Each structure stands twice: as C-alpha cells, then as structure tokens.
Amino acid sequence: MGETCRLFIGSRLSGEGRRSLERYYQRRDLLGFDWPGRIAWTDPEKWHLTWLFLGDVPIDRIETLKTRLLRIAPHLQAPMLRLDRVEIWPSVRQPRMAVWGGEGAFMAPVAQAVRDAFFDFPDNRVFRPHVTLARFPTRKNAPKADTESRPDPAGQLLLPDDCWPEPANWAIGNITLFRSHLNRGGDYEALCTASFCET
C-alpha cells in the first residue's frame, strides 16, 4: 500500500454555534478540577461536526473523494443543527470525551446521503451529531486516584447554571473533506469544501 492519510467528512461550527460555546469554553477551568490527569480541551478553531470518518485512505484516492463530495452537496438541503446538551461518552464511569450533542433524526437524510455516496467506507452506527469539547486521559495514562475520596466523574462536569452552553439552532452551509494531521497536534486541513442547497 502506498502513502495514506487520515480523512473524514465534516462541517465546521458556524459563528452562531461557536458563540453558544464561548462562555462554556471560557469557564473550562471549573471543569475537571479534581480529575486525575490532564483533560485535553478542543481548540475552538477545531470545533466541527463529523458526518463520516473515512480513516486511513491512500493519497491517490483524494481527488476521487473530492469529486463525490462536490457532486452530492448541491442536491442536499442545508440541514438545521440543534445542539442542546453536554454528554459524557461512552459513560461517566468510563469517560473518553465530553461532547455538545443533540438529536440527529432531522439530520439523518444528509447523514445517510453522505454514507451512500461514500459507500466504500461503511459505518453502521446510529448518527449522533456532536461537537467534541474535551478528551479525558485513558485509564492507563491517568494518575492513580483515591476513589473513596474523589467524587463521581459526572460531578466534575457540573457548572453554574449560567455557564452551560445555550441551546443553538443554525443551518449548516458547507460540508468539507478534511485531512487530520496527527503529527501536528491533530490539525485539520480542509481539502475540499462544497455548499449545500439553500432552498
């Protein structure tokens, strides 16, 4: 196999969506105060919604994938995104990430169209729209904690009521083929961006 790159289909968080997270992000020092290990907060410039993760793909396939994206986007109605809750995935007892999530049913047609267009990258999971806010250290990398004295992890994610992200609704205008550069701190490079249909 030749040289590969890590790709995914996503949409960047719009100005309105970003504003809804600003106060939450600015008060992030109040979260995870007693967590055993450093929480990795997502840089606001990297906030995005993932439609489909493609994984490691041969570089010589990029142009074909761009063509697919440009072909389907103009035929898809710009989806309305609503994010209204902070969740811990997969669970508060085994946390891997904190996400800003919401209902995915009304976005399902676009998610399915993307999966159909990129059929050779199968994903049978239920689409769950979300923006990753933070990642927790894995158990093997986290310092040992006194589990008798430390609160449940869920308690570390409580904030004053006025600090939680406000529910946000906005139309997503674009969809992008991204390349993820793990050796550059997880930077995302936009390889191709296409606009959804607005009417």
Image: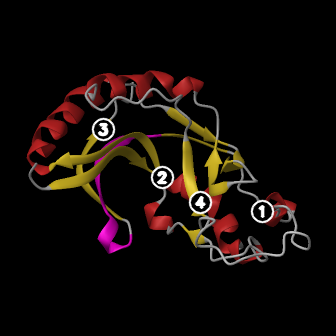
Q: Secondary structure at mark 4?
A: strand
29 sits to left or right of 140: right
Q: How would you rate the neighbour count of disc 1 (Cα within 10 Å): few for under 14, some for 14-19, many for 20 or more?
A: some
> Dividing the picture into quarters, in which one does residue 151 lie?
bottom right
Name above or below for residue 79 compared with residue 28.
above
**Residue annotated with mark 3:** 195
Which mark identifies residue 13?
A: 2
Q: Which amino acid, mark 3?
A: Ser
Marks 2 and 3, the one that precedes in the sequence: 2
Which residue type does callout 2 highlight? Leu
Name the disc covering residue 113, or none.
none
State which mark lies toward you, 3 or 4. Answer: 4
Which mark is in front, 2 or 4? 4
| Position of 129 relative to 31 (above/below) | above
Instruction: Please identify the quarter of the rendering in which residue 158 is found.
Output: bottom right
The residue identified by callout 1 is: 157
Q: Residue 180 magenta-drawn?
A: yes
Disc 2/disc 3 C-alpha distance (Å): 14 Å
**Magenta region, residue range:** 172-185
Label 4 sits on residue? 133
Q: Earlier in the sequence, mark 4 or mark 1?
A: 4
C-alpha distance separating marks 4 and 1: 12 Å
